[in-house]
Image (cartoon, helix red, strand yellow):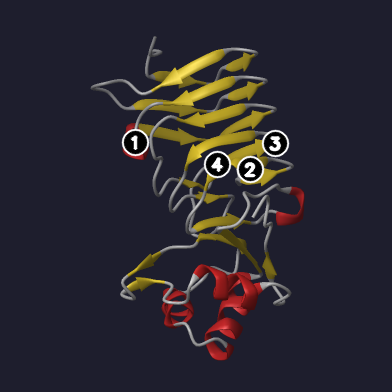
Amino acid sequence: MIEQPEYRNQRFFGEALVWGHPRLTTNVFGCTFEQCHITVACPSQGLMLGDSVFRHCTIVASRPHKDHQFFDVGFENCSFHGRYPGCEFGFREPSIGQLRGYVTHSNFRAAQLDMVAINSSDPASLLFPAWPHIVLVDPATTIARLASEEGDPHWRFLAGLGISPSTTALVLLYHAFNGRVGFRTSPEVLLSRLQGFPGVSLDRGSA
């Protein structure tokens, strides 16, 4: 059952919620969710979310949730499942809203992240998915160094995008598209080069 698309200034505890109305945008503002299981069944344009906090929640994107900027949303001790390409967690300028967003002590191991930014938050408190995910800490400095020291042109492409000073970590997913966008280096060679590189965190999992 898909829930009604309007939540404002409410508190929820231990509830199972499904967001994603077939015709209407789901609006969530000024709410607190604790120990809830939330399924996001709509694309990012179908969810307006702001000035809200999630604590000890499980959040499942049942379809790719793309390019959502959680600038005024707080996540504490949450677990994420599903795909979140291009999303940003945490506050950075210019942002609106009363709450400065953050993510802390949360688990992304069951999620797929690509070009996902962690802003104004400590990445050391987070669990990220394993390789082929690549976690860049202090990404502006790390990418600049990789662009100058490594031969793969994808690092130069990333350096040209510009990284916000508020971004404390950037999560990439290894991909290659015929050398046009993405890494040209083979995954085996890239993994070998990145292991031990300053500012790069890799969890090889069962690889």
Which is more N-terminal, label 2 or label 3?
A: 3
Disc 2 + disc 4, Cβ < 8 Å:
yes
Mark 4 surroundings within 10 Å by alpha-carbon count, few (fewer than 14), some (14 through 19), many (20 or more): some
Which is more N-terminal, label 1 or label 4?
A: 1
Label annotation for residue 111? 4
Q: Nearer the viewer, mark 4 or mark 1?
A: 4
Element under disc 1: loop
**Amino acid type of disc 3?**
Glu
Name which residue lies at 61% across and 19% down.
36
Q: Is residue 116 left or right of residue 157?
A: right
Q: Nearer the viewer, mark 1 or mark 2?
A: 2
Compute the Cα span from label 3 to label 2: 15 Å
Residue 122 visible: no
Quadrant where the image shows the N terminus: top left
Q: Which residue is mark 1?
A: 43
Mark 1 surroundings within 10 Å by alpha-carbon count, few (fewer than 14), some (14 through 19), many (20 or more): some
Element under disc 4: strand
Image: 98 above or below 173 = above
**Amino acid type of disc 2?**
Arg
Image spot of residue 4 (x, y percent): 38, 13
Name the image quarter holding residue 181.
Answer: bottom left
Which is more N-terminal, label 3 or label 1?
A: 1
Image: 129 above or below 78 = below
Q: Nearer the viewer, mark 4 or mark 3?
A: 4
Q: Which residue is mark 3?
A: 76
Image spot of residue 156 (x, y percent): 45, 82
Q: How many marks?
A: 4
